Amino acid sequence: MRRTAVILLLLAFLLCTTGAVGAKDSSKVVITANGKKYHRPKCHMAKKYVKELTVEEAKKLGYKPCKICKP
Ligand SMILES: [Zn+2]
């Protein structure tokens, strides 16, 4: 039983890391006019975005990552 849990954890970790690597090429994020979060351009919360910028720029401006699209 314990071994299964470890394997599952390992799998989850691997999925997370590969996801992070995959997100690297799409480092462009968008911000909305009155939101305090930055989003991936495809996020349904950011359909009417006003500006496109990099994650670093968004962080510098005080924006936080969206919890839905996890940019
Ligand atoms: Zn979003």
Image (spheres, helix red, strand yellow):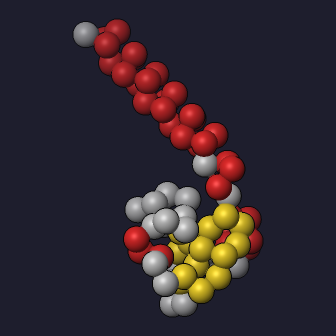
The residue positioned 41% from the left and 62% from the top of the image is 68
Is 57 or 41 nearer to us in this picture?
41
The residue positioned 71% from the left and 67% from the top of the image is 54
Judged from this view, the residue extending furthest toward the bottom is 34
Task: Please determine whether, in this image, residue 32 is positioned above or below residue 5.
Answer: below
The residue positioned 66% from the left and 76% from the top of the image is 52
Where's the N terminus, which quadrant?
A: top left
Q: Is residue 50 left or right of residue 15?
A: right
The residue positioned 47% from the left and 76% from the top of the image is 46
Tell me, yes or no, if residue 17 can be seen here. yes
Task: Please determine whether, in this image, residue 51 is positioned above or below residue 43.
Answer: below
Q: How many numbered marks, from 0 up?
A: 0
The percent coordinates of residue 70 (x first, y second) are 49, 57
Q: For residue 55, what is the image quadrant?
A: bottom right
Q: For residue 40, what is the image quadrant?
A: bottom right
The percent coordinates of residue 5 (x first, y second) are 33, 18
Q: Is residue 10 left or right of residue 71?
A: left
Is 25 or 4 nearer to us in this picture?
25
Task: Please determine whether, in this image, residue 69 is positioned above or below residue 34.
Answer: above
Q: Is residue 60 left or right of residue 3?
A: right
Tell me, yes or no, if residue 65 can be seen here. no
Q: Is residue 36 left or right of residue 56?
A: left
Judged from this view, the residue extending furthest toward the left is 1
The percent coordinates of residue 23 (x first, y second) are 61, 48
